[in-house]
Image (cartoon, rainbow, N blue to C red):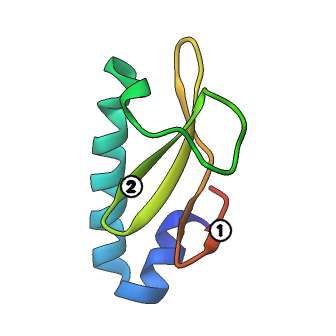
Amino acid sequence: MNIIEFIAQRDGMQRAENLYHQIYDKIETIPFMPYRFRQNLDANDKHIRDLIYKGYKIPFRIHDDSIEILGIYKENLWIKD
């Protein structure tokens, strides 16, 4: 299941697509200051951070030249992207 399907189950397809684009717009700003986000509490890795957006937790890994979204979850439901 991908992110849009997960959100669509809760909020409907149009809202899911809108939220998906909002999340990726937010993620695009990360390469400029990725370490400003809190370190993921579950991973013992300084390169894994969390974006909290509209109640969703979006863990991501910082690479030298890119950001990798690891998944998205809400209410303890992990959906790997």
The percent position of residue 77, horizontal first and vertical second, equals 62, 75
Q: Quadrant of residue 22?
A: bottom left
Classify mark 2: residues with Cα within 10 Å, few (<14), some (14-19) or many (20+). Answer: some
**Which amino acid type is shown beneath numbered disc 2?**
Ile
Which residue occupies the foreground of this view, 65 or 12?
Answer: 65
Decide if residue 1 is in sight here: no
Instruction: Determine the image quadrant of residue 81.
Output: bottom right
Q: Nearer the viewer, residue 19 or 73?
A: 73
Image quadrant in which the N terminus is located: bottom right
Q: Nearer the viewer, mark 2 or mark 1?
A: 2
Q: Residues within 10 Å of mark 1 (few under 14, many from 20)?
A: few
Where is residue 32 shown, x and y percent of the image? 32, 19
Tag 2 secondary structure = strand
Residue 48 visible in image = yes
- Residue 39 position (above or below residue 2): above
**Front-most of 4 and 23?**
23
Q: Which mark is residue 52?
A: 2
Residue matched to label 1:
78
Please provide percent x and percent y for residue 29.
29, 30
Q: Amino acid at mark 1?
A: Trp
- The answer to whether mark 2 and mark 1 are in CB contact below 8 A is no
Q: Residue furthest right?
A: 44
79 left or right of 26? right
- Asked if residue 21 lies left or right of residue 45, the reply is left
